[in-house]
Image (spheres, rainbow, N blue to C red):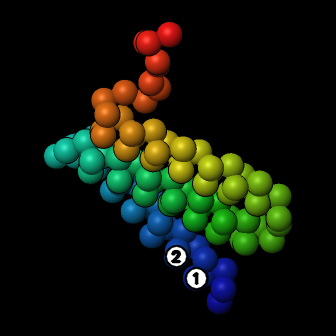
Amino acid sequence: MLDMLLNIALIIISVATIGFVYRVIKGPSTADRVIALDAIGINLIAITAIISVILRTEAFLEVILLLGIIAFIGTIAFSKFLQRGEIIEYDRNQ
């Protein structure tokens, strides 16, 4: 029963990820694209966690942590780009 529910959840999350990819490509604004990319990162974490439970292993826990860190850094970089127009600021007064 649990395996069937996990497989159904995996299919639903995969379909949602495909929807987010569509939003990244056809998004009406840049902010929508950034939110969709963040949601793709969260869905990848969920897919990895479900696969880890299905396979009954703890080997993917480090991958989940790494995906979370990369998704967070990407979201911060995109939001900084939207706010200021550049990601890395150089001090030109030196």
Residue count near mark 1 (Cα–Cα under 10 Å), binned few <14, some 14–19, many ≥20: few
- Residue 4 position, x and y percent, is 60, 81
On residue 5, which mark appears?
1
Per the image, label 1 sits on a secondary structure element best described as helix
Relative to 55, residue 86 above or below? above
Outermost bottom residue: 1
Q: Amino acid at mark 1?
A: Leu
Query: From this viewpoint, is residue 21 visible?
Result: no
Query: In front: 90, or 2?
Result: 90
Q: Quadrant of residue 49?
A: bottom right
- Residue 29 position, x and y percent, is 19, 44
Query: From this viewpoint, is residue 86 visible?
Result: yes
Outermost front residue: 93
Q: Tell me: 87 left or right of 7.
A: left
Q: Quadrant of the N terminus?
A: bottom right
Relative to 9, residue 26 above or below? above
Q: Amino acid at mark 2?
A: Ile
Q: How many numbered marks have been drawn onto this rendered protein structure?
A: 2
Relative to 46, residue 74 above or below? above
Q: Are marks 1 and 2 in contact (CB under 8 Å)?
A: yes
Q: Tell me: 80 left or right of 32.
A: right
- Residue 12 position, x and y percent, is 45, 70
Query: In the image, what residue occupies the spot 58% across and 82% down?
Result: 5
Q: Quadrant of residue 80?
A: top left
Query: In front: 45, or 5?
Result: 45
Query: In front: 36, or 56?
Result: 36
Query: In the image, what residue occupies the spot 64% across and 69% down?
Result: 50
Q: Tell me: 93 left or right of 48.
A: left
- Residue 7 position, x and y percent, is 58, 73
Query: In the image, what residue occupies the spot 46% across and 45% down?
Result: 76
Name the residue tied to disc 2.
8
